[in-house]
């Protein structure tokens, strides 16, 4: 049976990044996905942008929260999960893809293969490249990762697990300022609720590069070229 994915993209008032993200995502080689953009508060411009993509591809949709939470995307992520559950749409897995990463065209295809190899775990962790560094680090135990060793884009959740995780995160945030660590906390709360055999790693599979507004890393990714730092080291090593 083909694995279905929901891609949730939390965003706030950055149409250039979002436009580029949407143009990339609709070209994913893997086809069984749905993308929900969740804006942190009302925004007519962003809604109009997403609607143009919805016309091109009905798998793309838009949601906005009633007001801006400004909590590192935690509220939009939970809002997206809740909206999908209430609408009756349930996918096999959910990924949280930020609009400032360059996702590889075969990212979902790679993830689907790793999910099957891992016997469909509750949480799968894959690699994300930040500049010349890949996180999680090669060889690290996926059950004992620390702050700074994860990116939310590399966490592939079962939807109900993700809902529990983000509900817990927001409840905890009412008592202390923790959301700046949300990459790690989403993993931490999942880890605390699961047995070790329900979390699997495929960290050698790198699905995206962080590139923000920089075009050079994006073009290198499209062409299959290594980051500048790696290329320079290769030249110096000759």
Image: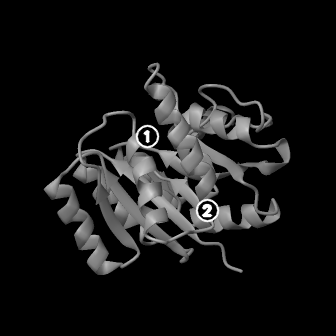
Whole-percent x and y of residue 103?
Answer: 50, 56
In this view, the residue in front, 134 or 161, is 161
Disc 1 to disc 2, how far (Cα)? 18 Å
Q: Which residue, given by chain and number where applicable, does mark 2 sit on?
A: 93
Where's the N terminus, which quadrant?
bottom right
Front residue of 193 and 16: 193
Mark 2, secondary structure of its residue? strand
Q: Residue at x 64, y 31 (%)?
A: 149
Relative to 52, say whether 179 is above or below. above
Tag shown at residue 74:
1
Q: Classify mark 1: helix, strand or loop.
A: helix
- Packing grade of label 2 (10 A; few <14, some 14-19, many >=20) is many
**Does 215 sit left or right of 220 as displayed?**
left
Q: Position of residue 164 (x, y in %)?
A: 58, 46
- The quarter in which the C terminus is drawn is top right
Name the residue at 73% across, 62% down: 115
- How packed mark 1 is, by other alpha carbons closer than 10 Å (few <14, some 14-19, many 20 or more), is many
Q: Residue at x 47, y 52 (%)?
A: 97
Q: Quadrant of residue 27?
A: bottom left
Q: Position of residue 4 (x, y in %)?
A: 60, 72
* Relative height, residue 194 to residue 16 (above, below): above
Against 32, residue 140 (above or below) is: above
């Amino acid at each position: 049976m083909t694995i279905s994915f929901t891609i949730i993209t939390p965003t706030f008032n950055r149409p250039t990044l979002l436009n580029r993200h949407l143009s990339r995502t609709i070209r994913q080689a893997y086809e069984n996905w749905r993308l929900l953009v969740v804006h942190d508060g009302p925004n007519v411009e962003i809604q109009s942008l997403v609607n143009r993509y919805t016309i091109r591809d009905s798998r793309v949709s838009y949601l906005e929260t009633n007001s801006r939470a400004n909590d590192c995307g935690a509220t939009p992520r939970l809002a997206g999960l809740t909206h999908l559950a209430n609408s009756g749409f349930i996918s096999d897995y959910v990924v949280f893809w930020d609009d400032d990463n360059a996702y590889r065209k075969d990212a979902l295809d790679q993830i689907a293969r790793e999910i099957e190899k891992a016997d469909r775990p509750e949480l799968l962790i894959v690699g994300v490249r930040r500049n010349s560094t890949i996180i999680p680090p090669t060889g690290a135990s996926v059950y004992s990762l620390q702050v700074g060793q994860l990116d939310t884009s590399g966490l592939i959740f079962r939807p109900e697990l993700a809902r529990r995780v983000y509900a817990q995160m927001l409840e905890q945030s009412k008592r202390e300022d923790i959301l700046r660590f949300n990459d790690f906390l989403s993993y931490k709360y999942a880890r605390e609720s699961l047995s070790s055999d329900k979390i699997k790693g495929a960290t050698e599979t790198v699905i995206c590069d962080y590139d923000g507004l920089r075009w050079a890393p994006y073009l290198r990714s499209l062409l299959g070229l290594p980051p500048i730092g790696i290329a320079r080291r290769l030249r110096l090593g000759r």
